[in-house]
Amino acid sequence: MQFKQSTGWILLPILLICITTTNAQQNKQTVIEQKATAILPKVIEWRRYLHLHPELSNREYKTAAYIADHLKKLGLEVQTGIAKTGIVAILRGGQPGPVVALRADMDALPVKERVDIPFKSTVRAEYMGDTVPVMHACGHDSHVAMLMGAAEVLSSIKKDVPGTVKFFFQPAEEGPPGNEEGGAPLMVKEGAMDNPKVDAVFGMHIESDIEVGTFEYKPGAFMASSDWFTITIKGKQSHGSQPWKGVDPIVVGTEIVNALQTIVSRQSELTKAPVVITVGKFHSGVRPNIIPEEAVLQGTIRTLDSKMQKETHDRIRKMATTIALAMDATAEVTIDTKTLVTYNDPALVKMMVPTLERTVGKDNVREREWVTGAEDFSYYGEKAPAFFIYIGGMPKGADKSKAPPHHTPDFYIDDSRLDVGVKAFCNLVFDYAKGNAKR
């Protein structure tokens, strides 16, 4: 009896500590919830300003200045000019903990907006020597606004923030123009993941066909690698009336285009992971009555497994050169890797999914299938465990099948619930520190 009583006295303080800790955590979540809700009008205002003033990859000068001005007012350590126009801002919390990075991309696309909204873009800019319309046709304006909001909320409770938070505002996710460097690879190269070294990195992407107030994710390989290939076919020029005197590179090219699809349908183990090969350009000739000397094919490869990626590269080279040789032509193949497979660290996903569920409710968080789109967020995952999350931007009750795709003139998202992203970013910071401390 005495033993039980003394044990009870020992356990009581421990129980009180646990209750106090739980209450403190709930209080922090409540504070984040209230602050993110209160800041929503500002987040929407930022997003719409950025939508009205889009800038192309590696040319986000005004966008970067707009963001940096906000971050400096919050008292953050702001580093500009990273990867040309990127920003790394550092918040040093008042509590011990890990280094967590949160990332948003800033660039727009050479697309002409067709959506009739008050903040519709009419901007035009120079792209690869041409004057083109510019539009935020992929939601990067929303990503920036949500991260600006998270920076403001976390700064306002700095004394309670565990560890260090690094905010990445990244240029050129859509790919730098021409032969320029840019995007996440250059952010990493210029030290964004170091000084202090990042322990975990989180990113979000708004989706036009996922309902607002919801998250979707996939552990492991999530989004595809992106490779761009060029096949240059050399034949022999001749008059169009005498094809037997030449070697027609257009005919050779059509054989190659058709044959490339057999790599997908007959040579790739699709039960392991998807493979996509698309030829998007076919250039050849100057006159209808001349068989040209050269044809150029250009396209993209999407894979979700690094071994399959290499095998696909090898098969394309072999197939193109062999077909050309069989038809008395030659083919030269070049392949340029733009992004790696976006890989969500399974242990990190398992740890952080409850955070998403607590943010929007368990019924509003779903695991999804592979995505053959690509994201250069993948390069951060080479340096630290990473978790990339889809957040809904489709109006409630809308028909998913009719949602306008990304990178199109009709792209549209509902920005009325961007506070969800702000809350999630903030909660991820606190919960990662808590989960990491338990390891």
Image (cartoon, rainbow, N blue to C red):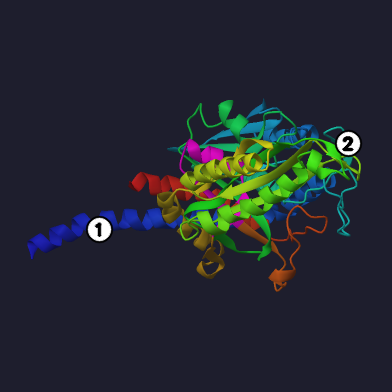
Whether 278 is among the magenta residues is no
| Label 2 or label 1, whichever comes before in sequence order | 1
Q: What count of labels does the image hold?
A: 2
Residue 69: x and y in percent read 74, 33
Give the residues in magenta: 370-390
> Is residue 362 shown left or right of residue 409?
left
Badge 1: few (under 14), some or many (20 or more) residues near its Cα, within 10 Å?
A: few
Q: CA distance from mark 2 to mark 1?
A: 73 Å
Q: Is residue 422 above or below residue 168?
A: below
Q: Residue at x 9, y 60 (%)?
A: 3
Frontmost residue, 284 versus 425? 284
Q: Residue at x 50, y 57 (%)?
A: 218
The amino acid at mark 1 is: Leu
Q: Quadrant of residue 188?
A: top right
Frontmost residue, 412 versus 370? 370
Residue 302: x and y in percent read 59, 49
- On the question of residue 37 being in view, the answer is no
Q: Quadrant of residue 186?
A: top right
> Is residue 401 shown left or right of residue 155?
right
Q: Which residue is mark 1?
A: 12
- On the question of residue 307 being in view, the answer is yes
Q: Which residue is mark 2?
A: 130
Residue 240: x and y in percent read 87, 44
